[in-house]
Image (cartoon, helix red, strand yellow):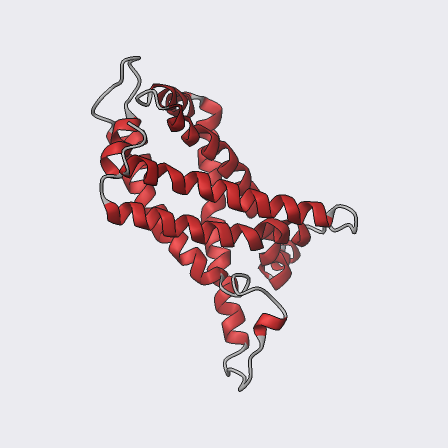
Amino acid sequence: MASFGNAFSSSIGKKLIMGITGLFLISFLLVHCFINALIFVNDGGLTFNMGAHFMGTNWLIRAMEVVLFAGLLAHIFQGFRLTFQNQAARPVKYAVNNGAANSKWYSRSMGLLGTLLLIFLIVHISKFWVMSRFTGIPTTDANGNHDLFAVMVETFKNPLIVLLYVLAMVSLAYHLLHGFASAFQTLGWNHKKYTPIIKAVGVWFSILISLIFAAMPVAMYLGLIK
């Protein structure tokens, strides 16, 4: 048992946890993006509220939320832990640092990008998730579902929140550009034939998911979705 715990507390073990939780969060992003993209049906939020109602009442989804939250906390904790560990391993900066020759800048800035995403998550959870799960949404739509769409419309009237969301999605894109392929690599899923495909899928996934998420608050702020 001790050796098992030591394995996951090692540098490789920490990266393994990051890879596993990262892939889990990527799958969540895909589902979450699909549900949220229902606002683009532009029917006053009826379709979106129906999807949100399903997500909020389905027992399997609710159970997965607990797993998701645990995975998110583990991912954040291990991310900061690895960042601080890497910084501590290099307490003295080299006179000449040509890191760009070996890696992309966003690969070296995962801690910073993750911090911005953490700020976004705190705002997002407090504005939407807490209300939909605990405090309650005060209004209902024409179908009798809780009108989370109306909450979104009201929230995204604030340009500062819209700006935060857009910046967070830029951060998410760069975070995914590094994390998508790295998660597969960490788990040992490397193959000269399939790795280029995984990297290509990762690039498109990172860009499209982030663009769709960023487009939502912008479209609402501009009044394109009502």
Q: Is residue 99 left or right of residue 133?
A: right
Residue 68 picture location, percent across and down: 48, 39
In the image, residue 12 sits, relative to residue 73, either above or below, namely below
Residue at 44% x, 21% y is 58
Residue at 25% x, 46% y is 159
Q: Residue furthest bottom?
A: 95
Residue 5 or residue 157, whichever sits in front: 157
The quarter of the rendered structure image containing the C terminus is top left
- Kindly tell me whether residue 164 is visible in this rendering: yes
- Kindly tell me whether residue 5 is visible in this rendering: no
Residue 133 or residue 216, whichever sits in front: 216
Residue 1 or residue 65, whichever sits in front: 65
In the image, residue 104 sits, relative to residue 16, either above or below, namely below
Asked which quadrant contains residue 204, the reply is top right
Residue at 39% x, 28% y is 40
In the image, residue 75 sits, relative to residue 106, either above or below, namely above
Q: Residue furthest top?
A: 143
Residue 31 picture location, percent across and down: 50, 32
In the image, residue 109 sits, relative to residue 224, either above or below, namely below
Q: Is residue 5 left or right of residue 156?
A: right
Residue 154 picture location, percent across and down: 22, 34
Q: How many numbered circles does the render carry?
A: 0
Residue at 47% x, 27% y is 61
Residue 169 picture location, percent across and down: 42, 48
Asked which quadrant contains residue 14, the reply is bottom right
Q: Residue furthest left?
A: 138
